Amino acid sequence: MKKYAFALALICAAAIGLNSQTAPPASAPQFTPDGKVVLPKDYREWVFLSAGVGMTYGAAEAGRQQNFDNVFVNPAAYRVFLQTGRWPDHTMFVVEQRAASSEGTVNKGSVGRYQSDLISIGAEVKDPSRAPEGEWAYFSFGKNSDNAPLLPKTAACYSCHSQNAAVENTFVQFYPTLLPVARAKGALKPGFKQ
């Protein structure tokens, strides 16, 4: 009986040792062998940060459709941000762009809008080993892709985020629950005003 108890104790100790080894977080971005980021199947279960209407990198154009942008961030990164006001390596934002529709709304006397068809999905990833320069990299999945290549450094997202983001390369100024955290932690970029 003592032999079995000893063997069971060894097995339990080995299992605890294997379980305590450091592994990448489950919500860390995944990449294909050729460097494309994989769209997490559960991103809509991540922390929802905000929805914007008509957010664009370019100048407003007359008659241009005003789309919704929904922003999600992986839960592990969100928890670190709440504690520190900074985004840890392997932070991943998923931005889902949807059409803004008005037909079919119950608001007959107003110009109510609701989200409808998916237009595209993009991602912003904090990973210095993937970024062309700096820490943040950008990816575009389009409408139907499960993985996305790295956007070139010439893409508008790099310069816009670098010049206009409140915290690191992220638009925390548009996330009403996180802007106060960034202020309290002293994480806003120097000179940022809002």
Image (cartoon, rainbow, N blue to C red):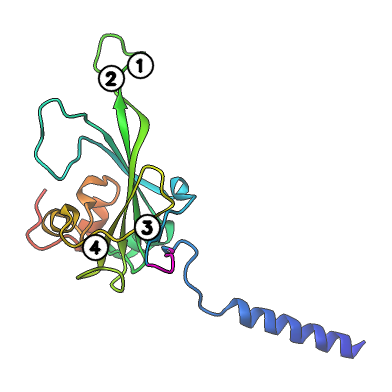
**What residue does disc 3 label?**
78
**What residue does disc 4 label?**
185
- Mark 2 and mark 4: Cα distance apart in space: 37 Å
- Mark 2 and mark 3: Cα distance apart in space: 31 Å
**What residue does disc 1 label?**
105
Instruction: Give the magenta range.
Output: 30-34
**What residue does disc 2 label?**
112
| In-front residue for pair 81/61 | 61
| In-front residue for pair 154/136 | 154
Percent across and percent down for residue 83 are: 34, 63
- Mark 1 and mark 4: Cα distance apart in space: 42 Å
* Amino acid under disc 4: Lys
Percent across and percent down for residue 59 are: 9, 39
Assign a secondary structure to mark 3.
helix
2 or 4: tag closer to the N-terminus: 2
- CB-based contact (under 8 Å), mark 3 and mark 4: no
Q: How busy is the neighbourhood of tag 4: few (under 14 within 10 Å), some, or many (20 plus)?
A: some
